[in-house]
Amino acid sequence: MASTHFEAVPELASDADATGRDLIVMKFGGTSVGSTQKIKDVARRLVAAREAGRRVVGVLSAMGDTTDELIRLAHEVSPHPHPREYDMLVSVGERISNSLCAMAIRDQGHEAVSLTGSQAGIVTDTSHSKAKIVEVRARRLHQELDRDRIVLVAGFQGVSTDLEVTTLGRGGSDATAVALAAALGGACEIYTDVEGVFTADPRIVPDALKLATISYEEMLEMAATGARVMMARSIEIARSYGVPLHVRAAHGDTEGTWIREEANLVLEKAIISGVTHDTAEAKATVLSVPDQPGVAARVFRALADAGVNIDMIVQNVSAQGATDISFTLPKTDLPAAEPILEMLAKEIGAAGVAYDDDVAKVSLIGAGMKSHPGVAADMFEALADAGINIEIISTSSIRVSCVVRASEVERAVQAIHERFRGYAEERVNA
Amino acid sequence: MASTHFEAVPELASDADATGRDLIVMKFGGTSVGSTQKIKDVARRLVAAREAGRRVVGVLSAMGDTTDELIRLAHEVSPHPHPREYDMLVSVGERISNSLCAMAIRDQGHEAVSLTGSQAGIVTDTSHSKAKIVEVRARRLHQELDRDRIVLVAGFQGVSTDLEVTTLGRGGSDATAVALAAALGGACEIYTDVEGVFTADPRIVPDALKLATISYEEMLEMAATGARVMMARSIEIARSYGVPLHVRAAHGDTEGTWIREEANLVLEKAIISGVTHDTAEAKATVLSVPDQPGVAARVFRALADAGVNIDMIVQNVSAQGATDISFTLPKTDLPAAEPILEMLAKEIGAAGVAYDDDVAKVSLIGAGMKSHPGVAADMFEALADAGINIEIISTSSIRVSCVVRASEVERAVQAIHERFRGYAEERVNA
């Protein structure tokens, strides 16, 4: 195979399964490679996998705060660093960690080579600092693997179709790892500072359960509603190419959580996979909007053009020819959204815009809820019993989300998790 | 022009002069780019040259101690870092400084682009960590310059004929700058923390004079005998391709020293260009060597094979069939040289080997001494008048060097400089 298309054209087929699963891509995040000692530990893990007979590709993030430090330098030099130069700068962190790891592996008696994103054939589009992977040209990777080498690939970066260095934005190293697993036909292990995917945040629900498996679809909903384990983009690549993902702790040998095809799960019992929450969103309400066709489209088109990510949208029932439109958006997008909304409110004759950043979202995820009516009602009841008011509701076929007061979100998670604990335990013990 | 051959095949012709000298390569060392503020200052210098109508290429070293810090990390991970991975690691420092500088230039309203050694077409041999430039493939450089951009090139690095990242070793950024000036047909300015080339080290001879011009040959002898301004390799590239070099201070606008063809100098007066000294060498003596053909060859072949750089060699007159062979070598090469010498001494039946690292070398350089007999005698007299004993003497057509006790080297420099001050003043005022 010369190449495989990824994020930009995910509909193309992959030959991921053609070579079997003896190949493993092991990805380590920044805290797992935060010191030279930790890099030597990572090297030992990679060597152990090689000695167990696997072909091994390692993807390391930059050490600790290296990338933040580079970003700080950029902003000292320039208020708005040029995107192309910014990527030249911030992509060096991964080169440091991966070359150090290759040295450590060689000292442990194995062959290793570290490759930049460009050398590894990670081809992206031309959107600097948020590039998407379009192709993996795996020729060099195959060569190095065929030479019995452990191959280290600098995550978070690639080379654009214009031959410039690009970076992949948030979650970029995960995307690199999953794309490599897809192109090479392997499984992908994500080593992180949590032990796997839990039925709720263990800091809020101390007896939350670690899931042994979860489907791509459920994991996508978990990621979209606040679970911080992985970002949706990497899960989407994994789903498109059928890459089995294993999220596990960087220290110790405990099994983590496998993310894979729904068909592999015991679906009858898999009603609920978890409760997630997100405090990073704000609520905006456009007040007294004239109830005319095209008004909502105008508002959300303008926000989309400005790159604002809208999540839940609610339009109240119209009364006397005017209505309120509420929606949630990331708090970080508020500065971009506010001037657009103020302008639009005037143009469309609305009474004004109200903002509320004291909200939080709590969600219940489960592929099984498709075939089990009443899950949403159970969730609303649990919140009512706890005296928690629901401000906005939105649902998908495998998710129910509610916006509540930020001060009440922890109690909301606890109440919902308690209500569905029986299902979660059945699933984990299935 | 597609390419020009450099260090590996310096005998090939360059077309450096074909495009005139409107192009300037400006190289800045690590202390000149040690902070983001200093990088902004460098950006202003590059912009000023562009606004004066020049086409401008900047070559920046890594910021301050960045490279030392990377080397420290490598040695924390591995006692003997793998050369290929070492180069992947230590080459990132220049990428940081050059991309930051490109950002700063853009903020000052000019177009700029930073290129890695590879992107700039710096092709080297495959000797990791001490690669030599074999070719500059200047296509991308010409493209960027033709787009009216200030082009920043990461110094000290290139891409090997095997397509691996290489670094050029000590003095590598200067070599990059001079090779670019040769390939593009420009002049080269080396911005550094000294104001130019002096007739002696101003810390030892406070009234030493700054030379306005010096020939490549004289500068090569100065570099070889302890002047720290530039390393011989870059001067050799400049000489091979007729690149005019201007060594000057990174701060202020004072003219520095031009290094160029001898023909441009006022030769009749240019008897002496300077007094240099070097305390980094040690003396080794193989004692009572049997006086047979081939013995010296054997000793120095074995040392050369081990990469030991021998400088001055003296073989004393043979007495009773045995003789002493003395030579100087860098103190840093002593650990490599000692076991070889001990073994050789036994094999050839010598009495033993004596080491002396308490020596220093003082040299007098001047293209004019070819046609002025008596310069060496004047120098020896100056040392004798100061009561300084000479242990080894070696000469070239434009240099006389003497090994003296380390404790006497400053007085030696002062005595010789005082003796030849008249010549130096004539030259500077010529």
Image (tube, coloured by chain):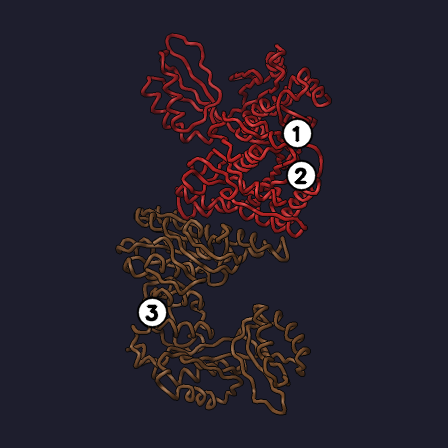
Chain colours: A brown, B red
- Asked where in the image residue B370 lies, by quadrant, the reply is top right
List x then y, in percent, for residue B330.
48, 28
Work out how far the residue at label 1 is from the one at label 3, CA to CA, in angstroms: 68 Å
Q: Is residue B21 left or right of residue B232?
A: right
Q: Which residue is mark 1?
A: B257
CA neighbours of label 3 inside 10 A, class few (<14), some (14 to 19), many (20+): many
Which residue lies most toward the right here? B429
Tell me, for residue B318, which label it has, or none: none
Q: Disc 1 vs disc 2: Cβ atoms closer than 8 Å? A: no
Tell me, for residue B54, which label it has, or none: 2
Tell me, for residue A260, which label it has, or none: 3
Tell me the SS state at disc 2.
loop
Q: Is residue B206 left or right of residue B137?
A: right
Q: Is residue A333 above or below residue B201?
A: below
The residue lying toward the viewer, choosing from A336 and B267, is: A336
- Asked where in the image residue A420 lies, by quadrant, the reply is bottom left
Q: Which badge, 1 or 2, comes first in the chain's sequence?
A: 2
Work out how far the residue at label 1 is from the one at label 2, CA to CA, in angstroms: 20 Å
List x then y, in percent, for residue B240.
54, 26
The residue lying toward the viewer, choosing from B368 and B422, is: B368
Residue type pointed to by label 1: Thr
